[in-house]
Image (spheres, rainbow, N blue to C red):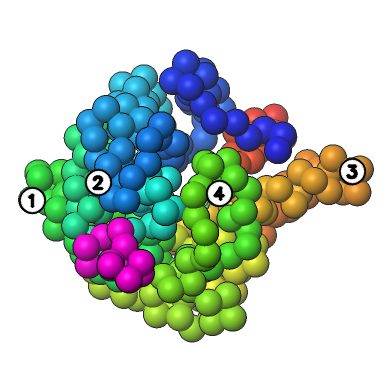
Amino acid sequence: MPGVVQHSLDSFRAELQRAAEAGIGGVMLFGVPERKDAVGSGATERDGILNVATRVAAREVGDALVVQTDLCLDEFTDHGHCGVLDDAGRVDNDATLVRYREMAIAQAEAGSQLVGLSGMMDGQVAAVRAALDAAGAHGVPTLAYAAKYASAFYGPFREAVQSSLRGDRRTYQLDPANRREGAREVALDVAEGADIVMVKPAMSYLDVLADAAAASPVPVWAYQVSGEYAMIEAAAANGWIDRDRAVDESLTSIVRAGAEVVLSYFAIEAAKRWERA
Ligand SMILES: NCc1[nH]cc(CCC(=O)O)c1CC(=O)O
């Protein structure tokens, strides 16, 4: 897909500079490890690629950008699930929380300034908060992917990170038909101590986003995901849509619905265009 690549550490450094120059708020880092295993060892190893890249980003642009890390096992597990599995092959929620605690500490040590809890395990916010505090990382806030739906719009992301997933994530991500569950998950994550809550995807969930914005005592962010990016890019590549206007309108709609911050693959170009305007 145009504009989507896996970075080496060198091209990553250049991209960080572009992001800092564009004046966006921050970057969210994901890792694509060389080796995967059942427990996602690469996520917690000091020399695992995500932790190495986090150290690079914190050192080089940590003052200009908020360096954020995706805290989830799916890129690192050979089965592709966001957690570890039990003997029956089901995601084991509580065993996964142990791994998330270890991952949070590894990411904080590497210099992450905000951990993005995207795994949708029950109790993940409280578990990670306790682990960070016990490790002395009181200043690292949690971004809770509170209302994360089991969406078809993650397809291009899974391709980009070479996901090993077979099956789906419907036992831990939310049912797209269920609006109230989004609001319930936001309230639960706030009660567990989330510093920010996320709604994901964005454009097909603007009602959920508006609900969260109306009720949440903490900031509400939204994630315009890979499939949302892909739809606009594909239509534009075919000459079927005015690309720049569509990008701006999509971001405007997400802000209008109540997002204080938008994670978007269009961030750098939108920041540049809006600065010129
Ligand atoms: N850790 C899971 C994760 N992290 C980012 C995305 C998708 C983001 C996107 O589509 O842009 C996903 C979703 C998933 O595979 O369930």
* N-term-proximal mark, 1 vs 3: 1
Residue shown at the point (47%, 16%) measured from the top left = 10
Q: CA distance from mark 4 to mark 3?
A: 24 Å
Task: Say whether mark 4 is within 8 Å of ligand 1.
Answer: yes
Q: Which residue is mark 1?
A: 134
Occupied quadrant, residue 202: bottom right
* N-term-proximal mark, 2 vs 3: 2
Q: Which residues are magenta?
A: 84-96
| Above or below, 277 relative to 120 | above
Q: Which residue is mark 2?
A: 103
Tag 3: amino acid: Asn
Occupied quadrant, residue 153: bottom right
Q: Residue furthest front?
A: 87
Looking at the rendered image, the disc whose residue lies closer to the viewer, 2 or 1, is: 2
| SS for callout 4 | helix
Residue shown at the point (19%, 57%) measured from the top left = 98
Q: Position of residue 166 (x, y in %)?
A: 52, 59
Q: Which residue is mark 3?
A: 238
Q: Which residue is mark 4?
A: 158
Task: Say whether mark 3 is within 8 Å of ligand 1.
Answer: no
Residue shown at the point (52%, 41%) measured from the top left = 161
Tag 4: amino acid: Arg
